Image: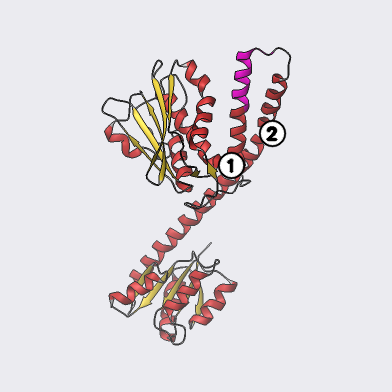
Amino acid sequence: MSETILIVDDTPANLGVLVETLGAAGYRLMVAEDGEEALAQTAQTQPDLILLDVMMPGLDGVETCRRLKARAETRDVPVLFMTALNETADKVKAFAAGGVDYITKPIEHQEALARIRTHLALRRLQRELQEQLALKERFMRIAGHDLRNPLCLILMSGELARRQPAVPAGVEKYLANIDEGAAQMRRIIDTFLDLRPPQSAGAASGRIDLGLLAAAVVRQHEHAAERKNITVETAFAENLPLARCDAAHAYQAFTNFISNALKFTPPGGTVTVRTSLIGPRLRAEIQDTGPGIPAAERNQLFREHARLTPRPTGGEESNGLGLAIVKHLVESQGGTTGAEFPATGGSLFWCELPVG
């Protein structure tokens, strides 16, 4: 299907030449002789690209562009200005209004066609990406919704198992871990499904005790540490103020941090979890005695699907998403993340959250 271009120009001669050139190139055309007419037409039909004259009586091109960009239905339509102006300030005004490019008058038709084709190709790619993201999000929401049923079954089964007579103390501990892990998975799914709308960066409304939250996550991972004979040490500062953060987001971030440390720490190693107050920020650190990260690969940390040289030491799976998830969750709450690599070896990952 050919794409539609709206030409906005108050000079009939310019309109005639552009209509002839673009029509011959196979584009469908809309024509407006002033800004008001352009706004009226785009309220009914959205073109794929707009050629907009800068100098027009009444509503000029710059103001017309501002109004187009202020409306949801035309916000993403690329606008190419047509101008005889050569002053840098005028071009800056045009870009500030939302234009993506400009064509200098008198128009050289081959150059104009090349610019138009480029921006239409970019527009197609943008739409394809938006469609792919929408499809992926829809699939993830369906998957998230469907995962709630087996999770509820796991939680119910764990509860029924704990009610059985004479449950051994060791089994009771494992059942508690299953229950806590499944409950956390349900919280993650609920957050993803917008049952708990995420706060915008820096605007988190929740308040959490960082030490209590870190201790709960450490408890959840005791069994995983025992299986690899890893010692988990804690050093929680006392009397810390509350952190301003959504509890579900913080719990998920800590879970990924500690799970990552246990994966990459060899059997017999140590993972240390600390909390402290640094100025107006609360800091949590997870340090391990694993292999660390080669200097050449450290710029890939916190990126999705990063494939680094170090591999899990106990055959665990790693999809390269854990640290990227931590970064997204912490930054969505106005916090920051980072990593350090002590000269003695291992890795130290940290996050900082604002004081509540």
Residue located at (48% from left, 83% from top): 34
Disc number for residue 140? 1
| Magenta span | 167-179
The disc labelled 2 sits on which kind of residue? Asn
Q: CA distance from mark 1 to mark 2?
A: 15 Å
Q: At numbered mark 2, what does the secondary structure look like: helix, strand or loop? A: helix
Q: At numbered mark 1, what does the secondary structure look like: helix, strand or loop? A: helix
Name the quadrant containing residue 101: bottom left
Mark 2 Cα-neighbour bin, 10 Å: few <14, some 14–19, many ≥20: few
Count of labels in the image? 2
Mark 1 Cα-neighbour bin, 10 Å: few <14, some 14–19, many ≥20: some
Instruction: Based on the picture, tell me whether residue 178 belongs to the magenta stretch.
Output: yes
Q: Position of residue 184 (x, y in %)?
A: 59, 33
Return the residue at label 2. Answer: 149
Q: Front-most of 201 and 165? A: 165
Q: Position of residue 67 (x, y in %)?
A: 49, 74
Name the outermost residue toward the front: 239
Instruction: Based on the picture, tell me whether residue 277 belongs to the magenta stretch.
Output: no
Residue located at (46% from left, 55% from top): 125
* Tag 1 near tag 2, CB within 8 Å: no
Residue located at (44% from left, 29% from top): 260
Q: Is residue 126 left or right of residue 299?
A: right
Prevailing secondary structure class for the magenta stretch in the rendered image = helix
Q: Front-most of 23 and 308? A: 308
The disc labelled 1 sits on which kind of residue? Met
